């Protein structure tokens, strides 16, 4: 099992004291890349190269051990997988379509294809992970499910999955995000979830994760924590990757069926990283496919101006996991900024940190204005209202198309933008309504 340092160096939710410097030895880039090609990650300690692992208080170790045992048993069990894929097909609506974006292709001078996670039940990719984890929670004998949410899509997805599978659900959501994602708060309540406002800390996604972890610490036996992104202590980054990998598997098959070959590039937005790792995983071994992740560049490159941990972060531990974080020289996590609630997080999943370190994926930051402009173009050219998160990926695809005209570019359209209307009314539509 993964190492779990004691409480004397960690606080109640598994974060190290500010003066703790945890720097696992990183193998050289060539070794990391070779192991990626062999699908060797995570290793037995829950590491993705030097990243990942498990940094939690002792009270959570038994719960994580039970979770790991459940993952080892059920994520490879044909009966469990049959039930999971039956829900994906009959309730979620998979496979989601692959759409040729003819209007954007003409505008940008490249061949643009959209993997339409916006058409999945509840409106985003989050449902893939939620239904799988709630099925796992039932198998593990949990009495209730808790979750965190930023943009609200994971909260909505978990509330819906719990309603579908008969589990009580509590969702923690930062007060700032509750204001800018009000439609999703109402959806969660209608789906039967209790929504708990988080008014501490930065009152966004990081604070919501903190509160969910505190809840879990208080009842690790009866509560299942349905973590929404590829972050957190092992085995969560692995669980989320495995449940979201359906995105990339479908997209790969659809590209071959509809075009006769793989894309030249696959592009996705990255916050914690669940949508992107779900798309990228199927293409990691296809070295001819360029992989590009787009982070929230916000309003600039300075600390507090963005949420781009891969572009501007440094290594450290946050919420049980060693990865790249937005922190100051003393290791204090900084507040972030993004027009997108779902990308507004000061860390990133450890597998993304590995993919960047190994040189397999390139990551760039996209500013608020550039993302909103891409959203407006998609609406006008395709009749599709994408989520602001997904619009960061569209902006990255436009950059790539302009740099490499004629390329075939697959874009992970992670969700739809209905939830973002309050934000869009204050930005793109200001003065028009």
Image: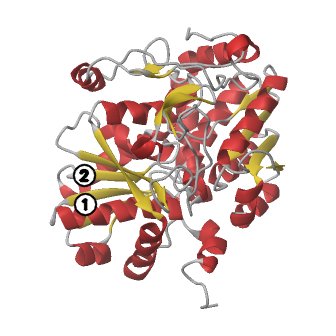
Q: Are marks 2 and 1 in contact (CB under 8 Å)?
A: yes
Tag shown at residue 28: none
Which residue position is annotated with label 1? 400
Judged left or right of residue 277, residue 122 is: right
Who's the residue at 57% across and 21% down the image?
71
On the picture, is 85 further left or further right than 26? right
Q: Residue furthest front?
A: 329
| SS under mark 2 | strand
Identify whether 180 is placed above or below 189: below
Task: Point out residue 166 in the picture as x, y percentages from the top left corner.
Answer: 78, 40
In percent of width and height, residue 354 lies at: 37, 30
Name the one closer to the observer, 35 or 50: 50
Residue 278, can we see it? Answer: no
Residue pointed to by mark 2: 265
At x 31%, y 17%, the residue is 27
Q: Is residue 19 visible?
A: yes
């Amino acid at each position: 099992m993964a190492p779990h340092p004691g409480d004397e160096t960690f606080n109640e939710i598994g974060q190290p004291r500010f003066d703790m410097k945890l720097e696992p030895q990183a193998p050289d880039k060539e070794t990391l890349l070779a192991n990626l090609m062999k699908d060797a990650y995570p290793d037995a300690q829950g590491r993705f190269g030097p990243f990942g692992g498990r940094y939690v208080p002792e009270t959570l170790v038994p719960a994580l051990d039970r979770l790991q045992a459940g993952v080892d048993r059920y994520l490879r069990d044909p009966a469990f997988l049959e039930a999971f894929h039956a829900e994906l097909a009959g309730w979620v609506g998979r496979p989601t379509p692959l759409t040729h974006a003819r209007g954007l292709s003409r505008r940008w001078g490249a061949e643009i294809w959209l993997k339409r996670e916006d058409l999945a039940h509840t409106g985003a990719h989050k449902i893939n992970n939620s239904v799988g984890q709630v099925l796992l929670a039932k198998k593990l004998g949990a009495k209730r499910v808790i979750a965190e949410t930023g943009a609200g899509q994971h909260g909505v997805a978990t509330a819906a999955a719990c309603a579908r599978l008969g589990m009580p659900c509590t969702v923690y959501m930062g007060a700032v995000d509750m204001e800018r994602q009000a439609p999703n708060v109402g959806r969660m309540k209608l789906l039967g979830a209790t929504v708990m406002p988080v008014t501490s800390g930065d009152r966004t996604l990081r604070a919501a994760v903190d509160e969910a972890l505190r809840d879990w610490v208080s009842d690790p036996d009866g509560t299942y924590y349905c973590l929404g992104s590829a972050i957190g202590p092992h085995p969560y980054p692995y669980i989320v990757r495995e449940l979201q990998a359906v995105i990339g598997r479908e997209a790969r098959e659809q590209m071959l069926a509809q075009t006769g070959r793989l894309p030249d590039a696959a592009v996705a937005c990255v916050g914690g990283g669940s949508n992107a790792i779900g798309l990228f995983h199927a293409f990691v071994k296809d070295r001819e496919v360029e992989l590009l992740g787009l982070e929230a560049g916000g309003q600039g490159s300075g600390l507090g101006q963005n949420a781009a941990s891969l572009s501007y972060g440094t290594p450290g531990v946050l919420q049980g996991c060693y990865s790249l974080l937005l922190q100051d020289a003393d290791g204090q996590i900084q507040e972030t900024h993004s027009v997108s609630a779902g990308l507004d997080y000061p860390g990133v999943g450890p597998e993304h940190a590995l993919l960047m370190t190994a040189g397999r994926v390139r990551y760039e930051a996209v500013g608020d204005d550039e993302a909103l402009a891409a959203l407006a173009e998609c609406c006008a050219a395709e009749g599709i209202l994408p989520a602001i998160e997904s619009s960061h990926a569209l902006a990255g695809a436009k950059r790539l198309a302009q740099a490499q005209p004629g390329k075939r570019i697959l874009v992970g359209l992670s969700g739809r933008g209905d939830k973002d209307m309050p934000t869009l009314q204050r930005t793109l539509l200001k003065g028009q309504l």
